Image (tube, helix red, strand yellow):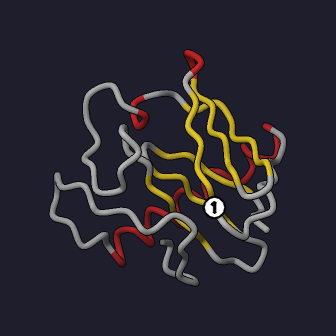
Amino acid sequence: MVRYGLKMGAHWVCFCPDGEKIRLVFYPNGLKESSVGGTGWAEMKFRYGLVHGSVVHFHYLGGHRFRVEIPGWDGILYPSFAERIQWIEEELAAYQALEEKDGDGAEAGEVPTAPKVGGSTSGSGN
């Protein structure tokens, strides 16, 4: 079960109760190897996500929606806005530090390929 999620650009970072972090990357046309550009999903302001079984529905301002199947997941719990303010800076700093340490394997300006939806590696941030 996922504890909560953070949306950063095209990255959706999910934090599980056991400390595992799962990063999903979404691109404008839904293809994991696509580059982010134009007025695609990455540039739209994220509003919230809803989970129905293993399907996550991402809702963006302007009424845009994105649906993704994540097998085996049974929900994402979102803290209140007040609770989010307390920990979001710390979590973002930890995630960014992890990204700087591990890297994506891409040179500056390149878009890394995304992991398979539903895939995870414990403790790596992917």
| Image-quadrant location for residue 18 | bottom right
| Residue situated furthest bottom in the rendering | 122
Q: Residue at x 80, y 62 (%)?
A: 74
Q: Is residue 64 above or below residue 75?
A: above
Q: Residue at x 36, y 39 (%)?
A: 29
Q: Quadrant of residue 36?
A: top left
Up-down relation of residue 76 to residue 29 (above or below): below
Side of 65 relative to 110 (left or right): right
Q: Position of residue 114 (x, y in %)?
A: 37, 62
**The furthest residue to the top:** 62
Lateral position of residue 89 relative to residue 100, left or right: right
Q: Residue at x 25, y 35 (%)?
A: 37
For residue 65, which quarter of the picture?
Answer: top right
Question: How many labels were placed on the picture?
Answer: 1
Tell me the quadrant of the picture where the N terminus can be found: bottom right
- Residue at image point 26% right, 28% down: 38
Few, some or many residues within 10 Å of mark 1 (<14, 14–19, 20+): some
| 38 or 45: nearer the viewer | 38
Location of residue 11 in the rendering, given as x and y in whole percent from the top left corner: 47, 52
Q: Of the residues shown, which amino acid type is indicated by label 1?
A: Ile
Q: Which residue is mark 1?
A: 70
36 vs 91, left or right, is left
Decide which of 30, 101 is in the foreground and name it. Answer: 30
Give the left or right position of residue 97, taking residue 49 as reference: left
- Residue 56, given in percent of the width and then of the height, sits at 67, 48
Q: Nearer the viewer, residue 14 or 26?
A: 26
